[in-house]
């Protein structure tokens, strides 16, 4: 950390609100949220970013914000102008406006870029309709720990808001996480990281440790309720959980998911009807895995990786280690959700896929066909009780399967007789081919 000399400037009355700033050395200035709202304006002048804080010119090259506010609804507003790159350091910053309707904790705006550097423990809680850290700027919002100080951020959205990203009915893009320990919790209908209720989200993770959860309807990372998600993971450790229709990573309830994993350790769990990675309830999923370690479990009727319930899944795996399990009833391990077609191409890596009950291990969900091509890698596919190991789900017809090259494939179709509340069931799924027809009344 740079050496800082604290000097009290006094208070400023602006629009009826109290502002107190604490200038540091020429390279940085520190401001305390407990003293009032903090408004940062960054502009691009003469080839560099210049700052105004609460209307006053600042000589530093970055702004540091600290302090605690849990009573006065004070918040931070960061506006970055066209061409500017605002560098804002959160140092043990705690803002709790969770009981304030429409209460921001931190909001960004403007046409430029905003970078958040994390020092110490930081918590942001917003009120109804707002995200914990709400993105409003056009260019990148980057969250990082470039100094390697083990910086942390816990961001919680209010009802309809994302943990990090959009407020109610707000779609967001250009969210980038490069470092730090990030915990993001969406409010009801908001994504953990991504869109608010009704909003889509575009998110890139290139480092750090990320835990993202939606309370209901949103993806852990991606779209809010009704919104689609576009997510790229290049590096880092990621754990994501969707709820009630949301994918772990991808679309919110009713939204599609486009997900690319290039590296990293990823664990994802879908909510009811959502894929672990891919589409939300009734949403399609397009997923590419090039490298990394991936574990995905779908919600009820959702694929582990691919489509949500009633959604098709298109999955390409070229490398890495992937383990995928459907969440029950009708989804494939990898491919379509219940009633969804699964189009899967595997050219490398180690893949284990398990369908549960009526879904294929790799291919279609219950009633859905599988279009599967395997030309490399090590593949284990186990169908559900009525699903094929590779191919179609229960009752499917018209699946196409091609296995060639140097691939090493182990396949087991469903063939289980058991008793449930609806009577005896027999599931004669093929190892490779079509699923069996479910009949709950066979003797």
Image (cartoon, rainbow, N blue to C red):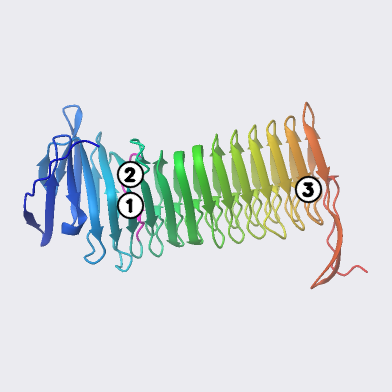
State the image coordinates of residue 94 (x, y, percent, origin top left). 29, 56
Numbered disc 2: secondary structure: strand
Q: Is the magenta stretch mostly helix, strand or loop?
A: loop
SS at badge 1: strand
Mark 3–mark 2 distance (CA, rounded to whole Å): 44 Å
Q: In which quarter of the image is the N terminus?
A: top left
Contact between marks 1 and 2 (CB within 8 A): the answer is yes
Q: What span is colored magenta in the figure?
A: 130-140
**Residue at the disc numbered 1:** 122
Residue at position x 93%, y 69% in the image: 443
Q: Which of marks 3 and 2 is in front?
A: 2
Q: Where is residue 87 in the image (x, y as percent from the top left)?
A: 26, 39
* Quarter assignment of residue 13: bottom left
Locate residue 427 relative to residue 136 in the image: left or right.
Answer: right
Identified at 75% across, 53% down, the residue is 359
Residue beneath disc 3? 382
Which mark identifies residue 143?
Answer: none
Task: Write down the residue under mark 2.
Answer: 118
- Tell whether position 134 is magenta: yes
Using a 10 Å C-alpha cutoff, classify the residue at mark 2 as few (fewer than 14 neighbours), some (14 to 19) or many (20 or more).
Answer: many
């Amino acid at each position: 950390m740079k050496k800082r000399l604290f000097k009290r400037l006094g208070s400023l009355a602006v629009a009826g609100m109290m502002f107190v700033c604490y200038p540091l050395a020429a390279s940085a200035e520190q401001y305390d949220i407990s003293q009032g709202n903090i408004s940062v304006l960054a502009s691009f002048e003469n080839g560099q970013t210049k700052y105004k804080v609460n209307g006053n010119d600042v000589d530093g090259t970055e702004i540091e914000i600290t302090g605690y506010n849990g009573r006065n609804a004070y918040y931070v507003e960061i506006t970055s102008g066209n061409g500017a790159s605002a560098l804002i350091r959160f140092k043990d910053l705690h803002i709790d406006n969770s009981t304030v309707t429409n209460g921001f904790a931190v909001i960004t705006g403007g046409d430029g870029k905003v970078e958040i550097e994390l020092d110490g423990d930081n918590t942001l809680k917003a009120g109804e309709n707002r995200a914990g850290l709400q993105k409003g700027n056009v260019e990148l919002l980057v969250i990082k720990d470039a100094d390697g100080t083990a910086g942390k951020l816990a961001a919680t959205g209010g009802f309809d808001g994302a943990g990090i990203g959009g407020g109610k009915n707000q779609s967001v893009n250009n969210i980038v996480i490069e470092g730090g320990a990030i915990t993001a919790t969406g409010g009801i209908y908001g994504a953990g990281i991504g869109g608010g209720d009704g909003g889509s989200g575009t998110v890139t993770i290139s480092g750090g440790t990320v835990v993202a959860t939606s309370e209901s309807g949103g993806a852990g990372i991606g779209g809010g309720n009704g919104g689609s998600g576009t997510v790229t993971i290049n590096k880092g450790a990621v754990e994501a959980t969707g709820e009630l229709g949301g994918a772990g990573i991808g679309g919110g309830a009713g939204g599609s998911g486009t997900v690319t994993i290039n590296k990293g350790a990823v664990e994802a769990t879908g909510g009811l009807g959502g894929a672990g990675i891919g589409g939300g309830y009734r949403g399609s999923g397009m997923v590419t895995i090039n490298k990394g370690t991936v574990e995905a479990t779908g919600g009820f009727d959702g694929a582990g990786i691919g489509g949500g319930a009633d959604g098709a899944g298109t999955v390409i795996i070229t490398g890495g280690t992937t383990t995928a399990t459907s969440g029950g009833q009708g989804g494939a391990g990898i491919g379509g959700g219940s009633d969804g077609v699964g189009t899967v191409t595997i050219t490398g890596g180690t893949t284990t896929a398990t369908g549960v009950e009526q879904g294929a291990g790799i291919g279609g969900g219950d009633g859905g066909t599988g279009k599967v091509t395997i030309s490399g890698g090590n593949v284990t596919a186990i169908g559900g009780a009525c699903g094929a190991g590779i191919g179609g789900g229960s009752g499917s017809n018209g699946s196409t399967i091609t296995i060639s090259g140097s691939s090493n494939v182990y396949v087991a179709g469903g063939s289980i007789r058991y008793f449930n509340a609806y009577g005896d069931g027999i599931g004669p799924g093929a190892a490779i081919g079509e699923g069996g027809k479910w009949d709950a009344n066979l003797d």
